[in-house]
Amino acid sequence: MNMLAFIFAANTQHVDVIGPILKPLVPFLVLAAIIKVATSFIPKKRRHSQHTKAHNKSLAIQHHGERDNTRKAKRTTNFLFRMIMTGSVGLFIIICAIAFGSGLGMFIWICIGLLLDVSSIIRIYAFFNKGKMGELLVMTRLRKGLPVDEYDILNNIYLPIGGGATTQIDHVVVSRFGVFVVETKNYSGWIFADASSKVWTQTIYHAKNTFQNPIRQNYRHVCAIADNLRLPKEYIRGVVAFTGDCEFKTPMPDGVVYSRKLVDYIKSFASPILKDQEKAEILLALREWDASVTPQQRASHVDNLRQSHN
């Protein structure tokens, strides 16, 4: 009875405090509920009656893209729901720790709540900036793994390609052993790749998505540098580095590596093909071209990429 009386007294003591304390949680919970409900309005897979083979083929192509978009939307909404709920739990823990805790115990619970909130924010940022996170990882690996007296590294450079257009290159490594043009890809799941295919396939949680063959994409970067520098393409080596926790289920084509093996791949080319003077001239030219691209051109390039992926 004494224990029940104590609990009842503690609850009545804090009853006027709990209401105002829980109010900050309401917007988070409402937003999480809206995102979860929105998932149910995403169109389900539709079935079609019998059609001609030609019509079925066109429908298959059309609905393949629709399914990809639907899966991406569902993954995004489910991910946001989980992150918002995690952040709400963290905020709830902090509020309860402040309201009812004291001393070291309160400090520990506040740290746990902050950890949940910060981790949710970081994961949301990483989710919507996968490309940037992958490029940052590759940039770090290159700087730590390549000797500065032999290799010069340029990151996120823009080159003019005529007609006012530009092309963006993730990383360029300039050395006596050649010019390495690195395209970074941040993917999870299984990757099915063929050097000659127009698109590659990513399988994650039984959902299949296609993306542009990065070897072809990077070859345009190689050509842009070769044309601007008037260098033979043999001096320029295209490399595609995959970050994230992806796994190739087909043999990796030549010039495609996991990011953890990128430095070893570049170092495997140990025969000098450029003189020191040529290396310096190439580095200077790339920096000057990158500096000549205006902020408006950079913004236009980013906008064009976003439109092409929508």
Image: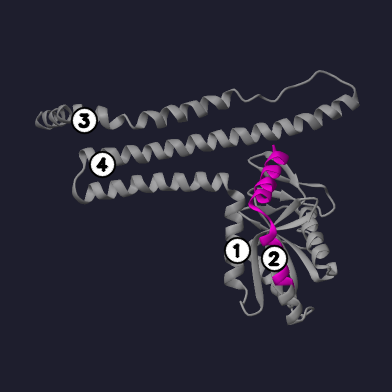
The alpha-carbon separation of the residues under discs 4 and 1 comes to 41 Å
Left or right of residue 288: residue 109: left
Q: Nearer the viewer, residue 205 or 157?
A: 157
Q: Residue at x 48, y 37 (%)?
A: 82
Specify the amino acid type for callout 1. Met
Any part of residue 298 in sight = yes
In this picture, is 21 found above or below 279? above
Residue that numbered label 2 is attached to: 288
Range of magenta residues: 282-310
Instruction: Look at discs 4 and 2 and give the one toward the viewer.
Output: 2
Which quadrant holds the N terminus? Answer: top left
Residue denoted by label 4:
97
**Rounded to the nearest whole Å, what is the CA distance between mark 3 and mark 1?**
50 Å
Residue indicated by mark 1: 139
Q: Earlier in the sequence, mark 1 or mark 2?
A: 1
* CB within 8 Å, label 1 to label 2: no
- Residue 115 lies, in percent from the top left, at 38, 48
Q: Helix or strand or loop: what does disc 2 sit on?
A: helix
- For the residues bearing labels 4 and 2, Cβ distance under 8 angstroms: no
Q: Residue at x 74, y 33 (%)?
A: 65
Decide which of 288, 30 is in the foreground and name it: 288
